[in-house]
Image (cartoon, rainbow, N blue to C red):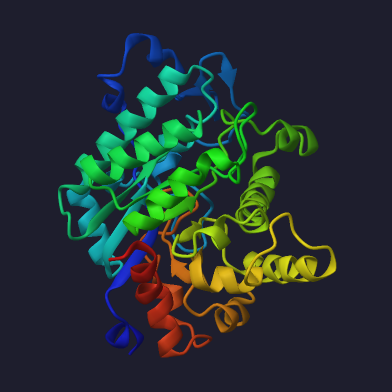
């Protein structure tokens, strides 16, 4: 019954896993910075330049091995659709997904490369490959371009290339403030926000834990344990990203800019927005807005869910147009097949809410 009444499903945050030949044409001096998995017994780690990540008890193939329902992360077999768009379309059909917006995987690992030219080269190579992947079925596959974190001018240049030349759907970056770089709210980023708002294309913050992007505080606090670091990293970074963009006035100054805070669940936003509203009243914020933080988010903000989280109904009641479905396919903590099953079958959502989460809100976010 639910499947029959729900509009065609949109996956608002899936992934590709870039093959090694994505680096074939980058300059020779940039290749030493390519994030490379290194197997060490029953663990593996990433190496980029001289940087080595923490160890993960898994195999590199787990990056593209979604789990079955109830299985541990990476327990499944590698999904061919991670790098083959035709195979991905078949997998989408199995889960009833009509359209998918895709983010890279190795694209989450390049933001701390200290050599500007190398970071720019890797970002461009990744975006070129994602664009080629989506051209296999441009009515169903939509790519998001990774922005370099070398500076605001570089980010704007690559955003223009992604939207105007590669025809990607929007752009994204990690939420961290890499040492030596400007904050998201820095005035140098204003041209980027104006450009995206005028182009009517979204911006997303997308975290990821890999160890080659700085995580020193987490590594020290949680003794390099991947699971506990992973549990904290995603919502923590998104809370700070949301606070940055609202507290310093980015959303208020750009009221048509749509921003997504992905792969961290949805219900954290309900509490954090309440807290921001409260802090505006108690202490004020660095930027005095024309609307409360919650009202800005209701107009412009989005978060994603992969399952029926505790508190989802309350979050939907407060922000009915702001929650989108994400499969995380084909990562090891995503479920396939069956990524849509729980949201389709739950009796905790009515049909209007189900349709909004599985399709309508993603259509608003990405302008599909």
* Number of numbered tags placed on the structure image: 0
Q: Nearer the viewer, residue 21 or 127?
A: 127
Q: Is residue 24 above or below residue 136?
A: above
Identity of the residue drawn at 42% across and 82% down: 354
Towards the viewer: 95 or 240:
240
261 in relation to 53, above or below: below
Q: Examine the rendering and report whether any part of residue 34 can be seen.
A: no
State which quadrant residue 291 falls in.
bottom right
Residue nearest the observer in this picture, 16 or 70: 16
Q: Is residue 289 left or right of residue 139?
A: right
Looking at the rendered image, the quarter that the C terminus falls into is: bottom left
Outermost residue to the top: 29
Q: Residue at x 51, y 56 (%)?
A: 262
What residue appears at the point 30 percent right and 18 percent down from the top-left corner? Answer: 26
Q: Closer to the camera, 308 or 260?
A: 260
Quadrant housing the N terminus: bottom left
Q: Position of residue 190 (x, y in %)?
A: 50, 46
- Outermost residue on the left side: it is 136
Residue most toward the right?
282
Task: Report the side of 367 relative to 257 (left or right).
Answer: left
Give x and y (percent) for residue 306: 48, 65
Left or right of residue 154, residue 265 in this image: right
Q: Residue at x 28, y 70 (%)?
A: 96
x, y percent for residue 27: 32, 13
Q: Is residue 227 above or below residue 51?
A: below
Measured as percent of width and height from the top left, residue 295 is found at: 59, 74
Question: In this orientation, does residue 300 appear?
Answer: yes
Q: Quadrant of residue 176?
A: top right
Q: Residue 100 vs residue 351: left or right? A: left
């Amino acid at each position: 019954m639910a499947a029959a009444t729900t509009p065609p499903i949109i996956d608002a945050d899936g992934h590709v896993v870039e093959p090694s030949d994505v680096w074939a044409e980058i300059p020779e001096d940039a290749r030493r910075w390519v994030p490379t998995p290194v197997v060490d017994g029953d663990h593996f780690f990433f190496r980029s330049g001289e940087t080595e990540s923490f160890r993960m008890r898994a195999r590199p193939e787990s990056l593209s091995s979604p789990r079955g329902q109830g299985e541990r992360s990476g327990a499944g077999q590698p999904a061919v659709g991670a790098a083959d768009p035709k195979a991905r379309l078949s997998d989408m059909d199995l889960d009833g997904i009509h359209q998918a917006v895709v983010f890279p995987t190795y694209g989450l690992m390049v933001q701390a490369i200290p050599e500007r030219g190398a970071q720019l080269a890797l970002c461009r190579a990744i975006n070129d490959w994602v664009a080629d992947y989506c051209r296999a079925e441009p009515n169903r596959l939509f790519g998001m371009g990774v922005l370099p974190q070398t500076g605001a001018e570089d980010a704007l240049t690559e955003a223009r290339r992604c939207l105007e030349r590669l025809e990607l759907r929007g752009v994204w970056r990690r939420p961290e403030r890499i040492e030596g770089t400007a904050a998201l709210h820095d005035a140098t980023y204003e041209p980027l926000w104006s450009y995206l708002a005028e182009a009517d294309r979204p911006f997303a913050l997308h975290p990821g834990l890999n160890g080659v992007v700085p995580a020193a505080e987490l590594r020290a606090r949680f003794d390099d344990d991947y699971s506990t670091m992973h549990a904290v990293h995603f919502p923590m970074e998104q809370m700070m990203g949301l606070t940055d963009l609202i507290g310093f006035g980015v959303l208020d100054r750009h009221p048509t800019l749509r921003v997504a805070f992905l792969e961290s669940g949805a219900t954290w936003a309900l509490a954090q927005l309440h807290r921001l509203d409260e802090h505006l009243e108690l202490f004020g914020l660095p930027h005095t807005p024309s609307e409360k933080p919650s009202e800005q988010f209701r107009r412009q903000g989005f978060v994603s869910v992969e399952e029926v989280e505790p508190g989802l109904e309350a979050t939907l009641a407060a922000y009915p147009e702001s929650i989108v479905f994400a499969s995380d396919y084909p990562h090891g903590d995503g479920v396939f097949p069956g990524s849509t099953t729980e949201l389709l079958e739950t009796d905790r959502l009515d049909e209007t809410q189900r349709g909004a989460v599985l399709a309508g809100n993603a259509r608003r976010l990405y302008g599909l």
